[in-house]
Image: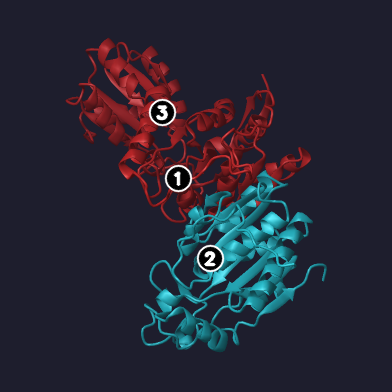
């Protein structure tokens, strides 16, 4: 029998641009929390940037962290409230540029939190400037001639770094592209929350997303670019499985 | 009389007894004994100790604990407190209370390890971006450090603000007998996040900024009205009032008594809060003493910082024509004979007033 999918109570109105992947990720996080029976037992630490929209996008307790510091704020929440679900919601600029130290150190300690980062290859909220995730040659507001990797470094791969260098509980990279990928991503998010509930330690799920507004593309073209040009570099899958 | 205890360890134990459930910090001389002591003390009590990767991370960990309405401490010194300003500003905005210990060391940048009062301006004006104030408590003995640290958490929760206990290398490193207060129950403020989303967020696009500011300023006015603390002596007949806090305050409290025995008409105002500045003391002086000839701050920084506030409040309470001098001794602990000799120079007109 066909099932009717209800919008989770945790979901509120999201103010993301048309075609942005954030909204799907928020919905998946809300679904997972409800399916795990944790919707009234969760505190988030959100980043600065488009992540700020979670203030209206989700009906749960959260702390607006300073730019990049969400993993440190989440650490404090975790230590104060050992039995709550604690997660961060950040963009790649927040977690991997300004917050690289806090992100890596929380992973290094194997802090029992979940970190969700949206990787859309640029700083979305401020108008599409280059981030460490920007592809070689990609034109952005601060690399209008295309990203020069000789001067600015190569696109950063934090899930790989964290899973190979530290001892986290669970690390994966998913994508908000096809229904199949979205379903797979939901499984990653579920694993991350379950690892935390099981006190296994730190989880990181990076989510590849489009940013049609700042890429200057309509959503369908942006999807095509994400799948054809970006995801081949940012391999999808589980880098550290639970219990490995 | 209690046991001899080092200042830094005494304040750490006071915070434990006040009911901190988490300490997060990063090593820095001259405050490091605080975290060394707490690394095992917290564990033994089943509480949390976090050695953070930076001061910046530490203050953000503090923010996370505070958002849950629980008691938390971080400690550092000058440069480390600089790194914490981002988090302090955010916490002021969100009205997350916390207690911070600043064991001040001299200097700009890396500075030095000498005790000093070079952080006065930053601490009394807020420190980070924005329009907020923190309550700054300045003890001058180890016992007073313990008492103020213990009470700091109540004050922080009362106003939902940051309270900083500001000591310095001298007070943090020296040993004195001290008595500890009783252990408090561990508490959670009723507004603290508990995962149930009981306090709903407003519409963050429809903010009323002037309204928000006025609500905050009401709180600042209440803090200013209710939390001024000071000690005063000899103010009723003094011609010169020394104003000094912390270690210089301690020196001057003794020296003023000696000088008065020698016939000098001097008094001492020792601010215990430097924000809010004890302006009510100026009101009292004005009422009691028509013979005042001037104010002299004794500070351990380059050319006086508190001297600005003394001049401002002298003006506010009708003593704006009196000269305000600064005797700045840069770092360390001012010596009795040096201050006495400089006082003679003030009277002889050899040291000019700042205002």
Query: Within 10 angstroms of label 3, few (less than 14), some, or many (20 or more) residues?
Result: many
Residue depicted at 51% across the width and 69% down the height: A97
Judged left or right of residue A188, residue A102 is: left
Q: Is B59 situated above or below B227?
A: below
How far separated are the C-alphas under marks 1 and 3? 26 Å
Q: What is the number of callouts on the image?
A: 3
How far separated are the C-alphas under marks 1 and 2? 20 Å
> What is the secondary structure assignment of the residue under circle 3?
helix
Query: Within 10 angstroms of label 1, few (less than 14), some, or many (20 or more) residues?
Result: few
Between marks 1 and 3 in the image, the one whose residue lies nearer the viewer: 1
Judged left or right of residue B301, residue B73 is: right
Tell me the cyan chain: A
Does residue A159 show up?
A: yes
Check contact, mark 1 vs mark 3: CB within 8 A. no
> What is the secondary structure assignment of the residue under circle 2?
helix
If you read the primary sequence from the N terminus, does the residue marked by circle 1 or circle 3 appear first?
A: 1
Q: How is the image coloured?
A: by chain
Q: What chain is tagged by disc 2?
A: A
Q: Which mark is residue A23?
A: 2
Residue depicted at 79% across the width and 68% down the height: A242
> What is the secondary structure assignment of the residue under circle 1?
loop
In terms of image quadrants, where is residue A109?
Answer: bottom right
Residue depicted at 61% across the width and 37% down the height: B71
Q: Nearer the viewer, residue A204 or A168?
A: A204
Q: Where residue B352 appears, x then y in whole percent?
A: 21, 34
Q: Which mark is residue B202?
A: 1
Q: What chain is tagged by disc 1?
A: B
Residue on which disc 3 sits:
B223
Judged left or right of residue A83, residue B134 is: left
Q: Which color has been applied to chain B in this rendered view?
A: red
Q: Nearer the viewer, residue A84 or B269?
A: A84
């Amino acid at each position: 029998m066909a099932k009717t999918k209800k919008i989770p109570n945790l979901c509120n109105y999201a103010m993301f641009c048309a075609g942005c992947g954030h909204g799907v990720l928020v919905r998946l996080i809300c679904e997972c929390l409800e399916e795990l029976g944790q919707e009234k037992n969760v505190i988030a630490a959100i980043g600065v940037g488009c992540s700020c929209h979670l203030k209206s996008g989700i009906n749960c307790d959260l702390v607006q962290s300073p730019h990049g510091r969400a993993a440190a704020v989440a650490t404090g929440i975790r230590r104060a409230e050992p039995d709550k679900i604690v997660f961060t919601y950040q963009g790649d600029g927040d977690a991997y540029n300004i917050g690289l130290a806090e992100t890596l150190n929380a992973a290094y300690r194997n802090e029992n939190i979940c970190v969700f980062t949206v990787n859309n290859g640029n700083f979305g909220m401020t108008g599409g400037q280059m981030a460490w995730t920007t592809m070689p040659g990609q034109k952005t507001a601060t690399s209008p001639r295309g990203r020069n990797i000789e001067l600015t470094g190569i696109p950063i791969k934090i899930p790989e770094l964290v899973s190979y260098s530290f001892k986290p509980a669970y690390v994966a990279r998913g994508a908000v592209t096809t229904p199949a990928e979205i379903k797979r991503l939901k499984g990653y998010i579920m694993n991350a929350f379950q690892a935390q509930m099981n006190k296994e330690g730190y989880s990181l799920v990076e989510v590849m997303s489009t940013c049609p507004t700042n890429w200057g593309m309509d959503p369908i073209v942006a999807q095509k670019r994400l799948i054809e040009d970006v995801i081949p570099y940012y391999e999808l899958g589980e880098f550290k499985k639970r219990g490995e | 009389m209690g046991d001899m205890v080092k200042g830094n360890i005494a304040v750490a134990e006071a915070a434990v007894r006040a009911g901190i459930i988490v300490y997060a910090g990063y090593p820095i001389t001259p405050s490091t004994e605080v975290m060394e002591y707490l690394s095992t003390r917290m564990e033994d009590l089943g509480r949390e100790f976090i050695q953070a990767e930076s001061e910046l991370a530490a203050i953000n960990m503090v923010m996370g604990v505070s958002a849950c309405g629980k008691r938390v401490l971080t400690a550092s010194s000058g440069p480390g407190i600089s790194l914490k300003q981002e988090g302090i500003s955010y916490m002021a905005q969100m009205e997350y209370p916390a207690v911070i210990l600043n064991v001040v060391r001299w200097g700009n940048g890396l500075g030095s390890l000498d005790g000093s009062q070079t952080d006065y301006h930053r601490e009394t004006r807020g420190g980070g971006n924005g329009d907020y104030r923190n309550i700054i408590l300045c003890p001058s003995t180890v016992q007073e450090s313990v008492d103020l640290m213990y009470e700091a958490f109540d004050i922080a929760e009362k106003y939902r603000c940051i309270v900083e206990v500001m000591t310095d290398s001298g007070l943090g490193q020296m040993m004195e007998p001290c008595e500890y207060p009783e252990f408090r129950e561990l508490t959670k403020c009723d507004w603290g996040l508990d995962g149930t989303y009981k306090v709903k967020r407003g519409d963050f696009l429809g903010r009323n900024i002037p309204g928000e500011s006025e609500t905050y300023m009401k709180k600042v006015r209440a803090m200013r009205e209710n939390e001024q603390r000071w000690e005063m002596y000899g103010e009723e007949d003094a011609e010169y009032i020394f104003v000094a806090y912390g270690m210089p305050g301690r020196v001057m409290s003794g020296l003023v008594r000696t000088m008065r025995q020698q016939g000098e008409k001097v008094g001492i105002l020792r601010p215990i809060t430097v924000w809010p500045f004890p302006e009510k003391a100026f009101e009292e002086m004005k009422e009691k003493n028509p013979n005042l000839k001037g104010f002299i701050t004794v500070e351990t920084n380059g050319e006086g910082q508190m001297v600005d506030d003394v001049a401002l409040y002298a003006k506010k309470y009708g003593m704006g024509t009196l000269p305000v001098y600064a005797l700045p001794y840069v770092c360390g602990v001012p010596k009795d004979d040096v201050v006495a000799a400089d006082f003679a120079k003030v009277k002889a007109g050899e040291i000019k007033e700042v205002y």
